[in-house]
Image (cartoon, rainbow, N blue to C red):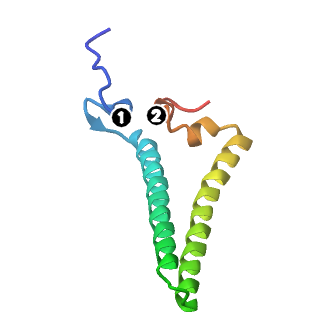
Amino acid sequence: MPNTPTPTGPWDPCSVNGVATLNCIPLAYSFLIKAALVFAGTVALFLIIWAGINMINSGGDAKKVEGAKRIMTYTLIGLTIVLLSFAILYFIGYITGSTSCITGFADMKKFVTGCE
């Protein structure tokens, strides 16, 4: 084998001589999905904590308690929608037999070499 560089980072499977190719689009998409899931979870966690603090500090005021309940309800609805959208994507991949391609974030080489 000629001097083949060993992969050193997550972009190496789709880059040629350190230059990104079109094969990097699925890899970038998977990174974006991961980041969006982490961001949604983090925002939901902070909003749930914020609603709990508002409920504790309400002092029995019905308007403040209702506002805290509203924050909690909308946060849980939003988080459920985000998680269900990922679950639906995974389910479609399972039905079509391309689950490893759609949700195979652990093995990035599948995006470059193709899916089974």
Q: Secondary structure at mark 1?
A: loop
Q: Are marks 1 and 2 in contact (CB under 8 Å)?
A: yes
Horizontal placement of 98 versus 36: left or right?
right
Locate the C terminus by quadrant. Answer: top right
Name the residue located 58 percent from the left edge and 32 percent from the top edge. 115
> Which amino acid type corresponds to the residue marked 1 in the rendered image?
Pro
Q: Secondary structure at mark 2?
A: loop
Task: Residue lying at the far top in this picture: please name it.
Answer: 1
Q: Nearer the viewer, residue 104 or 43?
A: 43
Q: Quadrant of residue 17?
A: top left
Q: Residues within 10 Å of mark 2 (few under 14, many from 20)?
A: some
> Which amino acid type corresponds to the residue marked 2 in the rendered image?
Met
Locate the N terminus by quadrant. Answer: top left
- From the viewer's perspective, is residue 37 above or below residue 71? above
- Residue 10: assigned label: 1
Q: Quadrant of residue 99?
A: top right
Name the residue located 52 percent from the left edge and 78 percent from the top edge. 55
